[in-house]
Amino acid sequence: MPFVQAYRGKFYYTEYGSMGPVVYLLHGLTAKNEDWGGTLDILAKTGFHVYAFDMRGHGKSERPETGYTPEDHAGDIEACAQILGHSRIHVVGHSTGGRNALVFAGLYPARAWTLTIIDQTLTADPDSWKKYEERYKQFPTPFKDEKALVKFLEKYFKKDEKRQVYYKGQFQKDEQGRWDWNYSTKAAWETQRLGRAKEAYEWFAKVECPILFIKGGNSAYVPPDEAEKIKGLMPNGQMVVVPNAEHAVFRDNPEGFLKVLVPFLLRQSQGGLFVP
């Protein structure tokens, strides 16, 4: 399995392609690198060298007890780039991964070639982490087998097959055949608690690279007033609304998402000096 062993920890990643401008894909809270689906393959076929990482505390990456501030996550990205030898990268982040990408671009401006944020609010919400903690208490984990997990989800999310499928995707089978979360629940609520403790708008002033903000047309995660505020904070950026998409824009409308992202990355790659 491909891992990066850095001074900040051990991080799992998926790699597509072998040449071209480097793109890092950063998933959202309680997600994993596989959730990007066909995005990696399409970007690779377009000519990019693509890496999708499991955030610390998630997937197959290490799950330390501490280190879940946005600055910590940004430091993880930088550590991986150092080990992999990537001097400039296009960093693309969804939801919480978008905030982590923003902080990374602000802390390491020489490393960030471009910044793409996908449907992430930058407002403060100090108590938002509590809903995650409460949610996990309602799941009697680990489940003894897959059948028990499915039965619970069908009862918990009655007549909501979409949520049943979504939550099942957050579980994995362990060596004893039991099914448990594929991330650390503490890591999830700590990332949320520390990430939403204060607003993150100030980071835009520290970003030097071109910025693309992609918003889901049907998503309420970034309300209209916040979208207007973000536009005003991106003198080198643009905001594009992808129709027929909710929060997970790249899954809800992959064609519309890629029609926005790919031209942006190609344009900026051609306009700058490529250093592998």
Image (cartoon, rainbow, N blue to C red):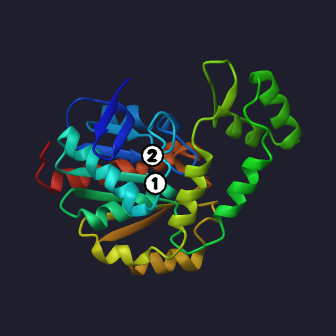
Mark 1 vs mark 2, CA separation in Å:
11 Å
Residue 85 can be seen, yes or no: yes
Q: Residue furthest top?
A: 176
- Judging by the rendered image, the residue that carries numbered circle 1 is 97
Q: Give, as a three-letter code, the residue at label 2.
A: Arg
| Residue at 58%, 46% in the rendered image | 30
Q: Quadrant of the C terminus?
A: top left
User: How far across and how far down the image is residue 236, in percent?
Assistant: 29, 72
| Residue at 39%, 78% in the rendered image | 202
Q: Nearer the viewer, residue 33 or 188?
A: 188
Label drawn at residue 24: none
Q: How many marks?
A: 2
Q: Give, as a three-letter code, the residue at label 1.
A: Gly
In the displayed structure, does residue 44 sit left or right of residue 255? left
Label drawn at residue 56: 2
In the displayed structure, does residue 260 sit left or right of residue 163? left
Residue 159 can be seen, yes or no: no
User: How far across and how far down the image is residue 193, in percent?
Assistant: 57, 64
Q: Quadrant of the N terminus?
A: top left
